[in-house]
Image: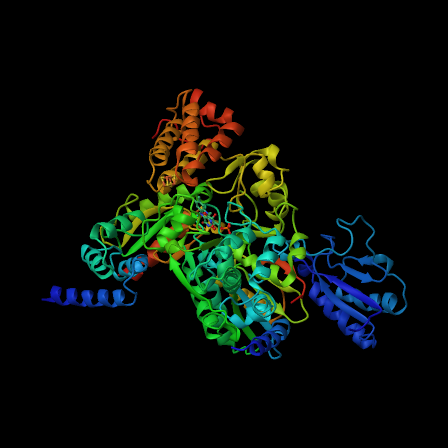
Amino acid sequence: MVQNLANSKLKERREKILRRYPPKRDSLLYILHDLQDLNPQNYLTSEDVKAVSEYLGISVGEVESVISFYSMFSRKPRGRYVIRFCSSPTCHLLEGPRVLEELKKLLGIEVGQTTGDGLFTLEMTSCLGACGVAPAMMINDEIYGNLTPFKVKEIIESYRKKGK
Amino acid sequence: MKLEELRKIRERMGSELRLRGGKVRIRIVVGMGTSGIAAGAREVLRTFLEEIEKRKLNDVVVAQTGEKGFASKEPLVEIIEEDRSTVVYGNMTPEKARRVMVEHIVNGNVVGDYVVAIANPER
Amino acid sequence: MRLYRSHVLVGMDTFTLLAGARKVKEHLIRQIEKRGLSDEIKVLETGSLGITNRGVVLLIYPEGCYYVNVKPEDVPEIVEEHLLKGRTVQRLLFKGELERKAVALPESPLDVRRQSRVVLQNCGVIDPENIDEYIGRGGYEALERALFQMKPQEVIEQVKRSGLVGRGGAGFPTGLKWEISAKVASEEKYIICNADEGEPGTFKDRVIMEGDPHRVIEGMLLAGYAVGANKGFIYIRGEYALSIQRMEKAIKQAYEYNLLGSNILETNFSFDLEMRKGAGAYVCGEETALIESLEGKRGEPRNKPPYPGTCGLWGKPTVVNNVETLANIPSIIVKGADWFRSLGTKETPGTKLYTILGHVVNQGVIEVETGITLRKIIFDYGGGMKNGREFKAALVGGAAGCFLGKDMLDVKMDYTTLKSYKAVLGSGAVLVMDTSTCIVDMLRCILDFFKRESCGKCVPCRMGTDRLYRLIVDISSGKGTKDHPKLMLELAQMMNKASFCPLGQSVLLPLSSAFKYFEDEVMEHILDKRCPAGVCKMGEK
Ligand SMILES: Cc1cc2nc3c(=O)[nH]c(=O)nc-3n(C[C@H](O)[C@H](O)[C@H](O)COP(=O)(O)O)c2cc1C
Ligand code: SF4
Ligand code: FES
């Protein structure tokens, strides 16, 4: 019952996002961005894919193939907070790997995994354009720079508090 | 908009940008680009606003701007006063902002420890 | 303007401020007032006067004499003796060698006046979220000029004559690009601003969009007017949250002022502008891949020709320009092609934005005239090497760039010169490395990047990047053989010839330059199973 209610609500919100964009192929990326942001687990569900394919009149396979191409989209559930740690040269040169080790220890996971409480997913990314304050990472839309093992700890703790 | 209106704005803003308004004694400009924000500029900006509110300073304004280009000194804060050199503070934190507030903004003494640049009045 | 018979300059830098320069200045003003000299003598603050560790420093014109260690109590004497009676105060006079002649500007890397700011002239100065401030600094004057005084062809001519070449990496002449699209007869044409900025170590476009978004809009409007396009897109990478926010706000304001939309400034010119977010794929910065992505597809590069200029977005003539390129346009239209040509080198005039990163004192973005040497970038603007370590190499042009060793420090960093050394300027990224860096380790990082970002459309690149990464891991973990470097170079050469797009083709550059300059170091990893910098962990995978 509760599940049904949640489902219909979700459906409604999905519909609303779709209708914000003209039913044209070039709306695809935008719709995918928004749908993914809507999901607390930061991923695109099979229902999402189906709805988009119907709305835009392109095959499910097409939609899947586009999703798989872009690193910002995921078809698997992720944590509420997706951490994207930069692995590009500047961050690598300026102690990025050391901070990453600390981060993994803090979260108790490896790259590509999600913490047991569903809060964090750790991913690697190419340069975020924040190299001036390298090493850098993004948590959802927020960017963090000048990272040190100590600073990472503070940041993760603040998210843990927020996530409770 | 008509061409004349555009020109009017240009004229008005041109002089305003140079003089920065009569009642304003000090402008605190915080660099709010990605590098600044990633290094904690938002907290610094908030601290200045709080301190000004607390002290009821109505001749001090806080403004934001983009990135100046020197990322490793972010967060950067400029203190602009009429007829005085602009003082640029770097690697700011809320604690440092509070000290700048007391020593520089209120008492007029530059906090040498945090200065990263001094620029002549120009704009 | 008033004429003063004397100017007293008070040097203001970190040292003099601590020594009480402000107090001295206030005393000066008070004393001068007291003597009724305010109309004759002007007290000015200036930056460092080039004398350090001598307390407060004054410079008095027209004599040009310097006083040092000035205390507030000395002020009455200076005013009385020097300014009133014209006799120098010997005991305070500075007699040593000046570190620099004349009145110099503040010796701070942060001082933007040591740079030549065209594109960045408003960055860090105006509030980017307020269109009026941009207008107040001369914004939309170029648009006004173009719409009311110039024919589209004249705009193109001006850009052509300026000699501006694209700042997105390929270095194609911008005026020519516009002309090609202008000549195609088509109802619909498009202007695309390439704001995908994915080259590792580059964030100059971000600084422009965050700090001066209207400059980009104005550049696009001018491009649209010149080629006859009424629709523009800004394709921006999804990670640039703040740029997206600022650009969106700027677009909204421009619409409110009718600087975008129909009949702009009551003329016949109309132009609509939309933002489109990318979704995290480096290859989408390549213009044809970008167009695919804009159309809502996988961002895989297209065959060229046809070039976007004639057949681009939805098959229509499309101009794709980099953010920095477009941000140059307003100044070229207002100040003219000759002014632009007076900056920088003859072959590629103007300024260039460089990002200085890595083991330098000051990391960040600078804008200087083209033709600057690597040494100047690092030591004048970057503030030199961090922690006093020695320079080892610089990776110039991002991951798809080139390692340059010590003997390249005095080479000019512009498109043409670097090309003659088989290097590239690319996006202007300069990653500086000191002697604590291991080149093999950096290569591993770069090849990991290529492996991650290869779009997989063509076999040479898809297989090649994967293979190269595995080979470099071998070397860095002590499992490399004598044949490894040769194998890798051959592979990269094959990719250079057979890959579909420049991504796969460009792996060769970082690889061959690293092997060329640091062959010994690579061989030490292989033959002695030893990492001289102590970075690679031998025996691990
Ligand atoms: C793999 C790859 C990535 C690229 N990334 C960018 C980019 O992020 N930004 C950009 O402006 N140009 C990029 N380019 C260059 C574009 O294809 C194109 O040349 C450029 O946008 C043209 O603009 P310009 O003439 O103003 O330089 C890239 C090219 C390749 C091959
Ligand atoms: S060279 Fe690489 S990036 Fe370019 S099309 Fe081929 S696989 Fe894709
Ligand atoms: S290299 Fe990490 S943000 Fe650019």
Q: Which is nearer the eye, C437 or B68? A: B68
Tell me residue C203's x, y (percent): 48, 52
| Left or right side of C277 for C370 | right
| Left or right side of C282 for C212 | right
Q: Residue at x 34, y 42 (%)?
A: C455
Q: Is residue C490 above or below residue A29?
A: above
| Left or right side of C197 for C4 | right
Q: Is residue B50 above or below residue C447?
A: below
Tell me residue C58's x, y (percent): 77, 60
Residue B31 visible in the picture: no
Q: Which is nearer the eye, C135 or C48? A: C135
| Left or right side of C455 for C330 | right
Q: Is residue C455 above or below residue C73?
A: above
Q: Which is nearer the eye, B84 or B71? A: B71
Q: Which is nearer the eye, C284 or C367? A: C284
Tell me residue A48's x, y (percent): 21, 58
Corner quadrant of residue C471: top left
